[in-house]
Amino acid sequence: MASSPFSSNIDTIMTIERHILEQQRFHPEATGVLTNLLYDIALAGKMIASQMSKAGLAQILGKTGDVNVQGEQVMKLDKLADETLYMLNDHTGRLAVIASEEHKDIIPIPEQYPTGKYVLLYDPLDGSSNIDFNVGVGTIFAIYSRVSASGPGTIEDCLQNGRKMVAAGYIVYGASTMFVYTTGEGVHGFTLDPSIGEFLLSHENIKMPNIPTYYSVNQGYFNRWSPGVQKFTQHLQAITSETQSISMRYVGSLVVDFHRTLLSGGIFYYPWDISKPEGKLRLTYEANPLAFIAEQAGGAASTGFEDILDLQPRSLHQRTPLFIGNTDLVRQAEEYIRKHG
């Protein structure tokens, strides 16, 4: 093969588009549709990040005055992120149906556009209650192959077991904007270079460190937890030795707390409590995609009793407890809960 006449370091520049295309080689049956869908989500991330950089403007900060299906106040950036993701994906012919945490029911593809083979579920702006305080937030998404034969997508397309996911990812909007995704061939992270408007590979084949650094939980709810969760937390607080110590870090934006756990090792958990016996986080939009990423990075995700990805969703906005991070810590949490309740 003839050598390139250009500087060799050009070959080290890996854009997200190029990386997604190269990942496609692991799937000889691939048609490129999933590749284009992932790139459109990355494009949505760029657009949302652009608006985030202007978040001091009055027309972007604050609440819309609406309340979503979760009973939460809708932030202006929540609505903008939701609309951006929808409008970049409703007309492409790649999707059979869309579902968003912000909408009570599934979102059909408009009749004037063709339907495709994939299903997209997303939380457009996780942690949006933190927006007014300049705390990091993020987008979380999951992609499935449709199970319905053809035509408009159905609720059954959206209520698939997590093991059937074909891709998942998230975008963190903070000091920098990062896009992290997996198609079942490892987890890869890209950082947005604002000078050229492109995501560049910065974290290849992410693996959760074996030695955990942080645990992440809202400890203000300690007295509401079950004895098993309380004792597990006390166990984490007691991990201090010459070779290992673990500190508590908690932001309150799931995607940000998980991102730190993924890169530094540790565990994030949001257990059930006396006020939320079913848990708080959404299975389809939050827990499932992050669980897929965690397992691909060598970690685990559990309800405290069983693996998240083994749950069969019963409803679009089903809630669940979540313990996610290093496998040994997740299994320890399960053991404390089995032993102490």
Image: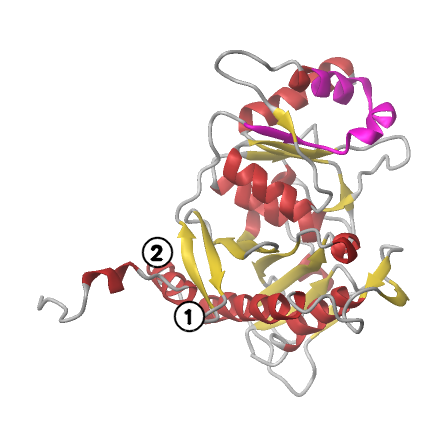
Position of 22 relative to 221 (above/below): below
Q: Is residue 289 left or right of residue 156?
A: left
Q: How is the image coloured?
A: secondary structure
For label 2, the crowd category at 10 Å Cα-Cα, with few meaning under 14, some 14 to 19 and many 20 or more, is: few
Amino acid marked by disc 1: Gly
**Mark 2, residue position:** 26
Near-viewer residue (16 or 341): 16
For the C terminus, which image quadrant?
top right
Rendered position, 71 above or below 305: below
**Residue 267 forms part of the magenta stretch:** no
* Amino acid type, callout 2: Phe
Q: Is residue 201 above or below residue 65?
A: above
- Identify the residue shown where x is 40% and y is 56%: 201
Per the model, the C-alpha gap separating discs 2 and 1 is 12 Å
> Is 93 on the left or on the right of 80, as rendered?
left
**Residue 51 spot, x, y in % from top left:** 66, 70
Side (left or right) of 9 relative to 110: left
- Numbered disc 2: secondary structure: helix
Q: Which of the two discs, 2 and 1, labels the residue nearer the N terminus?
A: 2
